Amino acid sequence: MTLRRRLLNRWLRLVEKPRIARAKTPDPLRRALELQARLFFHAPRGTQQQWITLGTADALEMTPPAGQNSAKVLFYIHGGGFTFGSPATHAALAAQLAQRIGARAVLPRYGLAPEAPYPAAPNDVRSAWEGLLAQGIKASDIVVGGDSAGGALAFGLLHHLLRTKSALPAAVFGFSPLADLSYSGDSFRENVQADAVLPAASASVLSDMFLGGAPCEDPCVSPLLGSFEGAPPIWITVGDTEILRDDARRLTKLCEGQGCQTTLVEVHDLPHVWPIFHNILPEARQTLDQLGAWIRRQPGW
């Protein structure tokens, strides 16, 4: 691991983790991430962007040079505990991956809690997906992915498509995906100190804002309770020091047990959703390269 990884982990542990822990509302987290995205996260040079409407949802479309005139689409769902983050904060990350796979990226805007509690987020994501297909894009020309809570929504969307026997994307992936809103994984206890970003005590605070008293067993937001038989290839990555480590492990085991072609890449001591630090962290670029190569190996890509 690089010196940059050690320095980044130290900064996250000293600055970002306490910021999340002391936040009483999502507002300071929203402001901080939006500012950091503008300062530190950059799309490939020459990337074009525009806001579009998909179904009842808005979406940010990012077209890097390699994605121009391409029929392929990366449908990327941002994370942020269902309460912060936006297409803008994750646009550079999605564009970097889209450049690697020769696609354009589409990032749906979904309602954030507490202003728009469950089921707004999965409903908005589903509407954006249906709106994308209504444009004439084939499901097999789309790869779906997301990070953290966005990973929950990505796999939740996949569960819904399988349950309704709908057209399926070519592949689905998750960066440090949240899979269980009951937070029953052992890593929520074992990695309380080791996780450089997420304070375990804040997880239930954010999920309570999101659920608003609704049960957490809906597979569209807790995909560990979902059914994935017949799913397209799945790729998941997580750090071994994350509190979400066991969400990734258990989701992988579930999918494998249902006959899905599933790849789990578990790495040592990298922070939560480290690919977002692609501009400064060599390991982030390596992960994007690895995922990009995996996507390109899928039939039709």
Image: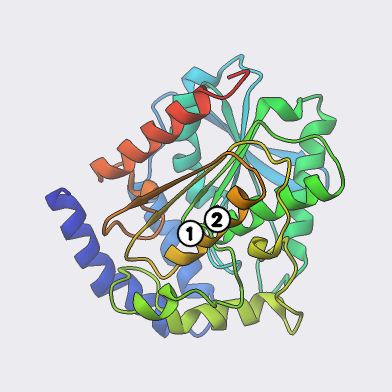
How many numbered marks, from 0 up? Answer: 2
What amino acid does circle 2 point to? Lys
Horizontal arrangement in the rendering, residue 130 relative to residue 69 (left or right): right
Q: Position of residue 80 (x, y in %)?
A: 53, 63
Quadrant location, the C terminus: top right
Front label number (2 vs 1): 2
Q: Residue furthest left?
A: 3
Callout 1 crowding tier (Cα within 10 Å): few <14, some 14–19, many ≥20: some
Q: Position of residue 279 (x, y in %)?
A: 30, 41
Residue 228 seen from this side: yes
What amino acid does circle 1 point to? Arg
Q: Position of residue 217 (x, y in %)?
A: 73, 73
State the residue in front, 164 or 101.
164
**Alpha carbon separation for disc pair 2 and 1:** 6 Å
- Residue sitting at x 68%, y 64%: 221
Per the image, the residue denoted by label 2 is 253
State the residue in front, 20 or 33.
20
- Residue sitting at x 82%, y 40%: 130
Q: Are marks 2 and 1 in contact (CB under 8 Å)?
A: yes
Callout 2 crowding tier (Cα within 10 Å): few <14, some 14–19, many ≥20: some
Per the image, the residue denoted by label 1 is 249
Above or below 115: residue 91: above
Residue 127 seen from this side: no
Above or below 179: residue 207: below
Horizontal arrangement in the rendering, residue 33 relative to residue 117 (left or right): left
Horizontal arrangement in the rendering, residue 176 relative to residue 118 (left or right): left
- Residue sitting at x 40%, y 72%: 198
Secondary structure beneath dot 2 equals: helix
Residue 167 numbered tag? none
